[in-house]
C-alpha cells in the first residue's frame, strides 16, 4: 500500500491509500477520486516529506493514541471515515436530493400510499424509525437506509 497526500483544484488537502502508484494514476485519470470537502474530481498529489527509517533506539517508542474525532465529523466503525468513502456518500446524497422528493416524517405513510397505488410512484426520502422501516419490509415495501453525511458544499 502507498499513502499519498492529495490536493484538489480548490486547494483542499486530504490523504488516500492505494495499492500502488499505478492504481492511483488509473483512478485519478478515470475521475474516480473525489475531494471529500468539495467533491471535485480534479485531484493531484501534494508535496510530501519523505519517510526516513530511523535507527533502533534504546528508548521504547511512545504509545500511539487514537485520534480524537472532531465534532460533527462522521466516523466509521474503526475510526474516521476515509476521504473516498465520504466523497462517495456526499455524491450519493446529492443525487438523492436532486432526483427524489423529501417527505420528512411522513416517509412510511407515503411509501404505503405509493405501494397501494394511492399516490404516484416516485423516488422519496425522509425519516423513519427502525420499527417503521421493519414494518414496511414486512409489508413487501422495499426500503433502504443510507448514511446521511454533511453536504460536500458545506
Image (cartoon, helix red, strand yellow):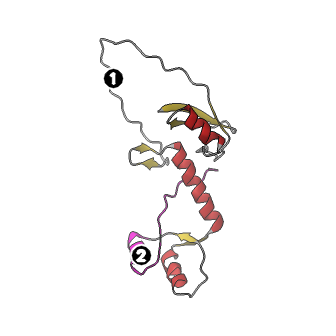
Q: Nearer the viewer, residue 4 or 94?
A: 4
Q: Secondary structure at mark 1?
A: loop
Q: Residue at 55% across / 82% down in the picture?
A: 114
Residues rendered magenta in the picture: 129-153
Residue 56, quarter of picture: top left
User: Where residue 13 sits: x, y (%)?
Assistant: 60, 35
Q: Main secondary structure of the magenta part?
A: loop
Graded by Cα atoms within 10 Å as few (under 14), some (14 to 19) or many (20 or more), the crowding at tag 2 reads few
| Residue 104: numbered disc | none
Magenta stretch: residue 135 in it?
A: yes
Please say if 40 is above or below 6: below
Q: Nearer the viewer, residue 60 or 143?
A: 143
Magenta stretch: residue 105 in it?
A: no
Q: Left or right: where does residue 123 sit relative to residue 9?
A: left
Nearer mark to the viewer, of 2 and 1: 2
Q: Specify whether residue 134 is in view.
A: yes
Q: Specify whether residue 14 is in view.
A: no
Query: Which numbered disc flags the more N-terminal residue, 2 or 1?
Result: 1
User: Where residue 84 sits: x, y (%)?
Assistant: 54, 45
Q: Secondary structure at mark 2?
A: helix
Asked if marks 2 and 1 touch (Cβ < 8 Å), the reply is no
Q: Residue at 53% across / 20% down in the picture?
A: 50
User: Where residue 75 sits: x, y (%)?
Assistant: 44, 48
Residue 31, quarter of picture: top right
Q: Residue at 51% across / 78% down in the picture?
A: 111
User: Where residue 109 sits: x, y (%)?
Assistant: 50, 80
Q: Residue at 58% across / 59% down in the picture?
A: 93
Residue 41, quarter of picture: top right
Q: Which residue is mark 1?
A: 62
Q: Report the number of numbered marks.
A: 2
Q: Which residue is mark 2?
A: 137
Q: Left or right: where does residue 38 sit relative to residue 129?
A: right
Amino acid at each position: 500500500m502507498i499513502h499519498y497526500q492529495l490536493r484538489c483544484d480548490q486547494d483542499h488537502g486530504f490523504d488516500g491509500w492505494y495499492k500502488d502508484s499505478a492504481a492511483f494514476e488509473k483512478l485519478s485519470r478515470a475521475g474516480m477520486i473525489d475531494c471529500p470537502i468539495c467533491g471535485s474530481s480534479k485531484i493531484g498529489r501534494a508535496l510530501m516529506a519523505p519517510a526516513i527509517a530511523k535507527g533502533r533506539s534504546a528508548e521504547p517508542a511512545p504509545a500511539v493514541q487514537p485520534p480524537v474525532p472532531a465534532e460533527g465529523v462522521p466516523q466509521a466503525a474503526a475510526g474516521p471515515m476515509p476521504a473516498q468513502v465520504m466523497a462517495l456518500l456526499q455524491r450519493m446524497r446529492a443525487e438523492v436530493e436532486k432526483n427524489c422528493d423529501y417527505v420528512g416524517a411522513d416517509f412510511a405513510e407515503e411509501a404505503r400510499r405509493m405501494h397501494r397505488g394511492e399516490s404516484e410512484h416516485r423516488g422519496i426520502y425522509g425519516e423513519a424509525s427502525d420499527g417503521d422501516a421493519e414494518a414496511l419490509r414486512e409489508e413487501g415495501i422495499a426500503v433502504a437506509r443510507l448514511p446521511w453525511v454533511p453536504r460536500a458544499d458545506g
